[in-house]
Amino acid sequence: MRRLEMTRPTAAENLALDEALLDEAEQADDPLETLRFWESPKPAVVVGRSSVINAEVRRDACRADGVPIFRRPSGGAAVVIGPGCLMYALVLSERLRPRLRQLDCVHEEVLGRMVEALATLVPGVRCDGTSDLALGTCKFSGNSVRRRRGHLLYHGTLLYDFPLPWIDRWLTMPPRTPSYREGRPHDRFVVNLPVSAEAIREALKKAWDAETPRDDWPADRTAQLVAEKYARSKWNEGPW
């Protein structure tokens, strides 16, 4: 697996690049897997593909604070990103990993490996809910998946030094919550993983055997996706 450590200037470009890596893999003759890391320099809200913004986002607060809202290509609920939130994206081949063809195995397969890697840094890391990573009873990572014919995009958040009050400021209580949340508000449910971003990156690089850096990236497809999708209110606001 190759590794790409690249943060583009805007959230729209970064979301587009995740999808462009998936498109690139689908068009390749041979399986093409990539682990990418990025971190938004400014706060933004990112909703799931089918999210209803008014049900998940405090739109007035976002507008007052100048926080933009974007939509990602995968499912799940809204998240807040920004400095202190390491983003990762995995493009994985179902040909190389046949178990991923079974939808109910995808989270188990990917998050199981994530837990093994991160538990070497912080004991007590575990999976919970549908696709959360938790430390004790508190969540530090939300994850989601987008499938294509032969590859999938699995990506998520890893909070390590994030201003947690931002979450309650810009997000409502999610319409669906895992049982382990027990109705807790954001400030009692979400936590930072007490390690550095560098330590997280090194652990995941080793776990996914992604020691070889990429010196190329699908720039043209990224730009196309920004122009046609991620910079357009029709996609981000949507009819949802």
Image (cartoon, rainbow, N blue to C red):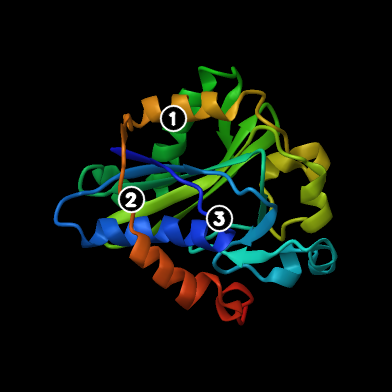
- Is residue 172 visible from the viewing direction of this image? no
Circle 2: residue type = Gln
Residue identified by numbered label 2: 102
Q: CA distance from mark 1 to mark 3?
A: 24 Å
Point out the image quarter for the N terminus. Answer: top left
- Is residue 4 visible from the viewing direction of this image? yes
Residue identified by numbered label 3: 9
| Callout 3: SS | loop
Q: CA distance from mark 3 to mark 2?
A: 36 Å
| Callout 2: SS | loop
Q: Is residue 122 above or below residue 87?
A: above
Point out the image quarter for the C terminus. Answer: bottom right
Mark 2 surroundings: few (<14), some (14-19) or many (≥20) residues within 10 A: few
**In the image, farthest residue toward the left:** 29
Instruction: Give the residue drawn at x 38%, y 25%.
Output: 206
Mark sitting on residue 134: none
Query: Of callouts 2 and 1, which one flags the residue occurring earlier in the amino acid sequence?
Result: 2
Q: Is residue 75 above or below residue 181?
A: below
Residue identified by numbered label 1: 204
